[in-house]
Amino acid sequence: MADIVLNIAKGRVAEFYNRIDTNDPANSAFIILILATSGIETDAVLRDKDDVAALVSGTTNEVTNSGYARKTLTDADITAFAPDDTNDRVDLDIPDQTWTAVAAGDGWNDFVVAYDSDTTGGTDSGIVPCTLHDFVVTPDGSDIVAQINAAGFYRAA
Amino acid sequence: MYLKRLYSHPDPAKIDPATAKVRGVQIKSAPSIKHFSPSLIESGTAEGWLSTIKGQFIFHGEDGDVIYKVNRGPGYYCCHCGLKLPGVPGDGIDKNPERPGHVASAHPGIASPDPANPAGYRGIAYYDCSKVEG
C-alpha cells in the first residue's frame, strides 16, 4: 500500500483507475516513475506537489540510469476493478514491474504511480502524481523487480 | 475489466467479512486484451469462478463465461524477436547473462523497439491474454 498519497490525488485514485480501466479518456494511463535518492525531499514536501513537473522541480529528481524508462500502464495492464463489498473498500492492484539491465548510477528511492489523462500530451505538467512507495535499490546492471503488495498499491476505504 | 464479486448471503448488510464466501462474479466489462496478474488468477481459481483449461482462462460469470487465450505467461522476453528468455521476474535471479547475451548476439547494435525497455528485453509479471469469447 502507498507510503504517501499526494494531496492532489486524495479521494481520486480509485476513479483514476476506473477511468483507465474503461478507456475514458482513451489515452489515459498510469505512469510509473522512479525518484532518485540524491536530493530527495521530505515526505511533507513531496505530498504537496500537484503534478510530475512540480514533483521534480525542487532538489528531487527522476533517476537517469541507463536501462531505466518510465512504465505506461493502460487498461490492458491494470488488474480488474473489483470493489470489495464484504470489507467495504476498493483495493487497486497493478502487476509487478520489471526494469531490465539497469546500470549503476542514481540510487533509487521511491516508486511513483501517477495518472496521465492523455499520454499523447507529452507534458509532465499534465500528469498527476498519486502515490509514493519506498523503493530503495542500488542498481548494478541487474534486472530490478518492483513487487506490488499482495493487496494492491492503493486502498480506498 | 470490471468484476463484481457475489457473496453467499443475499443481504450485503448481513455479510460478515471474516466468514463471507464468494459464490461467483458478475463480469461487468471485459476488454479484448488484458494482462492478468498471477494473484488474480490464483484468487479466481480458489474462489471457484475461474478455470484454466488448455491455455485458456475461463471466467465463469453469473451471466455467462468469458474466455481469454493466454498468449504468453510471466517471464522474460526479447523485445526484438519475442523469444522467451530464461527466468521469471521475482525468481531471485536478477542477473542472468543469457538475457542480455541473447540481445547482444542476435540483435547487435540495434536499438530496442520498446522504449520502455531500452535493454532490448522485458520482464513481465502477468499473463498476456486476448479475449476469444464472451
Image (cartoon, coloured by chain):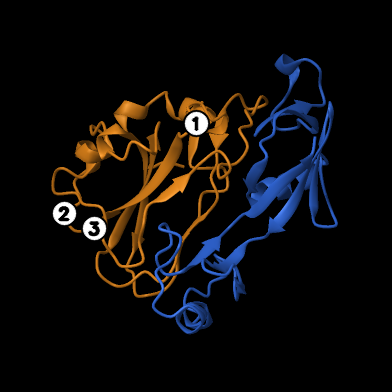
Chain colours: A orange, B blue
Q: Is residue A38 left or right of residue B106?
A: left
Which residue, given by chain and number where applicable, does mark 1 sit on?
A: A26
The residue lying at 45 percent from left, 81 percent from top is: B104
Res A79 label = none
Q: Earlier in the sequence, mark 2 or mark 1?
A: 1
Q: Is residue B38 visible?
A: no
Identify the disc placed on residue A39. 2
Contact between labelled residues 3 and 1, with CB atoms less than 8 Å apart: no
Q: Kindly identify which residue carries mark 3.
A: A37
Q: Can residue B45 be seen by looking at this rendering?
A: yes
Instruction: Measuring from the top left, give residue A153's x and y in whole percent.
Output: 48, 42
The chain under label 2 reads A
Q: Nearer the viewer, residue B75 or A58?
A: B75
Q: Nearer the viewer, mark 1 or mark 3?
A: 1
Left or right: A122 with respect to B77?
left
Q: Numbered disc 3: what chain?
A: A
Task: Count the labels in the image.
Answer: 3
Residue ID at (78%, 33%): B22
* Tags 2 and 1 touching, CB below 8 Å: no
Q: Residue furthest left?
A: A58
- Asked whether the residues under marks 3 and 2 belong to the same chain, the reply is yes
In this view, the residue in front, A25 or B64, is A25
Circle 1: residue type: Ala
The quadrant holding residue A125 is top left
Which residue is depicted at the point 13% across and 44% down? A58
